[in-house]
Image (cartoon, grey):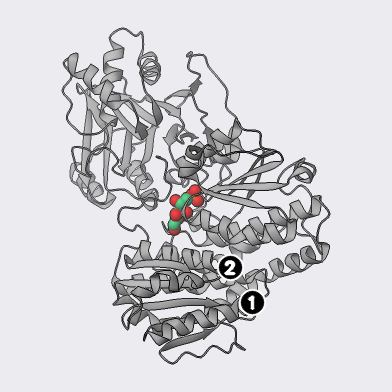
């Protein structure tokens, strides 16, 4: 999604801004732009498409400004175009970049038109620049005009602004959309993503909702909405260049797939004892609080939702508590009935997904036992809003398609199930087995990588198809859903997942000689049932690609059977995810898609 960077320095900032935009490319965007406070005017460049096109324009123009703002835009209001790209300006004086959505834009547009403002783009963002300009006429400063402007805005926003009259100064405002200040030596920064400035500073101030900032190269002033100075704690964020570069890999997604043994190690390390999880790994008081939990409400989006759906069985089996699972975008609109002793759990890689955050906010007012967040970004809003939390410690995930975030979320969810069961003194034998299996997971993931050669034998065929069907039963239906999501989002092949038993209730009509059917067949209590479902596919001439145990009795004549490493009942869902990630990655490579930044998608979805 959109990315903001601003810099004010004693050196020229063009390169810093472009580098920052490059670092945020992973978030997904369609256009980019920069506004520099140069000479007496603001110099603006915008371009449709990649940051490299903007970079070329910068090289041709060689601007020398020492302060400025820049942006990558992911279209929400108005098509991707140069006119709609940020920064947006008003009267060659005020320039802004904006992340988020202004819900009352129609009303503001009408007001501005009545006052004679000419609106050049279709965006809601441009209106902010004009409103600041308008409010400046009866304000004593740009800061005051910015504060007045935000009182008129409904929705979520983070804003960085400059004025042609105030060289070297950047203004910022935050409401329900991430924004932080970076502190350097004789230079300071504002950014919506710490990765944008990670290579120039480690010191950050995380702005809170309702905060404003005024930044020069030597000074950072933060204010509340009354314009009164407030202090925010200095935070160290270590996003080292190695974790944000591709290294020897072709794509970030490939690197992140192969990082999973380390990532999983980082999720579980220091959190497991001999036969159980350690106490309070979700924060002080969590083990005590979990004693009361009688049911769990999970809320998440996309891949993170698949993690909840997969993990449900662990909670039902090890903690003996029922689980409710909702799409974050749907949860609050169904007016959920909250029973006593229900724990609310959000799962999010970024910790900034707008739908999940809105659900969390809704849950805050309900009578939940408390809110747990499973998240990969310790500085995220979700991490700050939750009562208890666990960080997956997977390291930055840059590829838009989630890989290591998913498997580490599963490990964290297993630890949540173990923590609750331990607090309630339930199923010590199952806890012991699950703890041991969790410990073996990184090594098993490593073994699963050796399947790559086998997978390469089936990808050529799949890459030529328009559709694919994924089947599984029990928890493996959710893993199949995750496999289908991976394939469709990066290869653009239409892929559906079904519980194998549902096949005969409709989707079997799709099975012909063309459609590849990918089935997950671990030797669990449901494998016999799955076998007969696969016979239904064979009888229709379908091509089967089955992932299963070495001692499986499943025979595949048309297609391929791929032997999985020998894993346990508890860690198998994590291990069965790996070949599906490799499959999607290899197919997308064969189809030549921009798989780290697939079309129309964004990494951190900060709009509803
Ligand atoms: C798919 C994917 C998305 C995210 C979803 C939630 O590969 O990455 O479906 O899982 O947008 O994002 P987070 O986990 O950051 O809340």
User: How far across and down, in percent of the image, does residue 286 sit?
Assistant: 75, 43
Position of 423 with respect to 376 (left or right) is right
Q: Which residue is mark 1?
A: 524
Q: Quadrant of the C terminus?
A: top left
Q: Residue at x 76, y 41 (%)?
A: 289
Q: Secondary structure at mark 1?
A: loop
Looking at the image, is 159 positioned above or below residue 282?
above
Pick the front one: 69 or 67:
69
Q: How many marks?
A: 2
Pick the front one: 217 or 451:
451
Dividing the picture into quarters, in which one does residue 118 lie? top left
The answer to whether the residue bearing label 1 lies less than 8 angstroms from the nearest atom of ligand 1 is no
Pick the front one: 49 or 61:
49
User: How far across and down, in percent of the image, does residue 499 sit?
Assistant: 50, 68
Position of 105 with respect to 376 (left or right) is left
Q: Residues within 10 Å of mark 1 (few under 14, many from 20)?
A: few
Pick the front one: 269 or 231:
269
In this view of the protein, can residue 94 be seen by the observer? no
Q: Residue at x 52, y 54 (%)?
A: 304
- Earlier in the chain: of badge 2 and badge 1, it is 2
Q: Secondary structure at mark 2?
A: loop
Instruction: State the separation of the CA atoms marked 2 and 1.
Output: 10 Å
Q: Residues within 10 Å of mark 2 (few under 14, many from 20)?
A: some
Dividing the picture into quarters, in which one does residue 42 lie? top left
- Residues under numbered marks 2 and 1 in contact, where contact means CB atoms less than 8 Å apart: yes
The answer to whether the residue bearing label 2 lies less than 8 angstroms from the nearest atom of ligand 1 is no
In this view of the protein, can residue 552 be seen by the observer? yes
User: How far across and down, in percent of the image, does residue 528 sit?
Assistant: 59, 81
- Say which mark, if any, is on residue 474: 2
């Amino acid at each position: 999604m959109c990315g903001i960077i601003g810099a004010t320095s004693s050196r020229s900032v063009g390169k810093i801004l472009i580098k920052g935009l490059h670092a945020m490319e992973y978030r997904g965007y369609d256009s980019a732009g920069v506004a520099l406070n140069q000479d007496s005017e603001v110099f603006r460049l915008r371009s449709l498409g990649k940051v490299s096109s903007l970079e070329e324009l910068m090289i041709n123009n060689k601007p020398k400004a020492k302060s400025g703002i820049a942006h990558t835009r992911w279209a929400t209001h108005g098509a991707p175009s140069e006119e709609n790209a940020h920064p947006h300006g008003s009267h060659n004086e005020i320039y802004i970049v904006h992340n988020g959505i202004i819900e009352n834009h129609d009303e503001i547009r009408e007001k501005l038109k009545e006052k004679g403002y000419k609106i050049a783009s279709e965006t809601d963002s441009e209106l902010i620049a004009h409103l600041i300009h308008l409010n400046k006429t009866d304000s004593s400063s740009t800061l005051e005009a910015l504060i007045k402007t935000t009182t008129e805005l409904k929705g979520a926003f983070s804003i960085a602004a400059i004025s042609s009259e105030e060289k070297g100064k950047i203004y910022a405002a935050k409401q329900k959309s991430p924004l932080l200040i970076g502190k350097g030596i004789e230079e300071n920064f504002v950014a919506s993503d710490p990765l944008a400035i990670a290579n120039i500073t480690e010191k950050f101030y995380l702005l809170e909702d309702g905060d404003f900032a005024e930044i020069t190269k030597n000074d950072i002033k933060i204010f509340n909405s009354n314009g009164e100075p407030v202090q925010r704690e200095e935070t160290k964020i270590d996003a080292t260049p190695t974790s944000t570069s591709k290294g020897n890999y072709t794509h970030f997604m490939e690197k992140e797939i192969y990082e999973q043994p380390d990532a999983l190690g980082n999720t579980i390390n220091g959190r497991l004892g001999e036969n159980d999880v350690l106490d309070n790994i979700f924060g002080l008081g969590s083990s005590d609080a979990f004693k009361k939990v009688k049911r769990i409400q999970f809320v998440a989006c996309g891949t993170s939702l698949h993690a909840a759906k997969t993990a449900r069985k662990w909670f039902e089996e090890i903690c003996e508590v029922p689980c409710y699972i909702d799409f974050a975008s749907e949860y609050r609109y169904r007016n959920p009935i909250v029973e006593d002793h229900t724990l609310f759990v959000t799962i999010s890689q970024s910790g900034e997904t707008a739908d999940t955050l809105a659900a969390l906010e809704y849950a805050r007012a309900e009578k939940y036992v408390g809110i747990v967040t499973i998240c990969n970004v310790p500085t995220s809003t979700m991490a700050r809003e939750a009562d208890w939390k666990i960080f997956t410690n997977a390291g930055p995930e840059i590829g838009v398609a989630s890989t290591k975030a998913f498997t580490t979320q599963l490990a964290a969810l297993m630890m949540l199930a173990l923590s609750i069961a331990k607090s309630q003194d339930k199923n010590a034998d199952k806890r012991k087995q699950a703890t041991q299996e969790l410990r073996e997971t990184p090594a098993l993931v490593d073994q699963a990588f050796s399947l790559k050669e086998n997978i390469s034998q089936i990808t050529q065929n799949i890459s030529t198809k328009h559709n694919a069907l994924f089947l599984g039963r029990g928890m493996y239906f959710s893993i199949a859903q995750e496999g289908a999501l991976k394939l469709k989002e990066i290869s653009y092949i239409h892929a559906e997942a079904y519980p194998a038993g549902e096949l005969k209730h409709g989707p079997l009509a799709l099975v012909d000689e063309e459609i590849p059917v990918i089935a997950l067949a671990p030797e669990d209590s449901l494998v016999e049932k799955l076998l007969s479902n696969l016979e239904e596919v064979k009888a229709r001439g379908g091509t089967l690609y089955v992932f299963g145990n070495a001692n499986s009795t499943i025979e595949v004549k048309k297609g391929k059977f791929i032997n999985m490493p020998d894993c346990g009942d508890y860690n198998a869902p994590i291990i069965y995810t790996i070949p599906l990630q490799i499959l999607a990655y290899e197919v997308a490579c064969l189809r030549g898609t921009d798989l780290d930044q697939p079309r129309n998608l964004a990494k951190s979805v900060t709009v509803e």
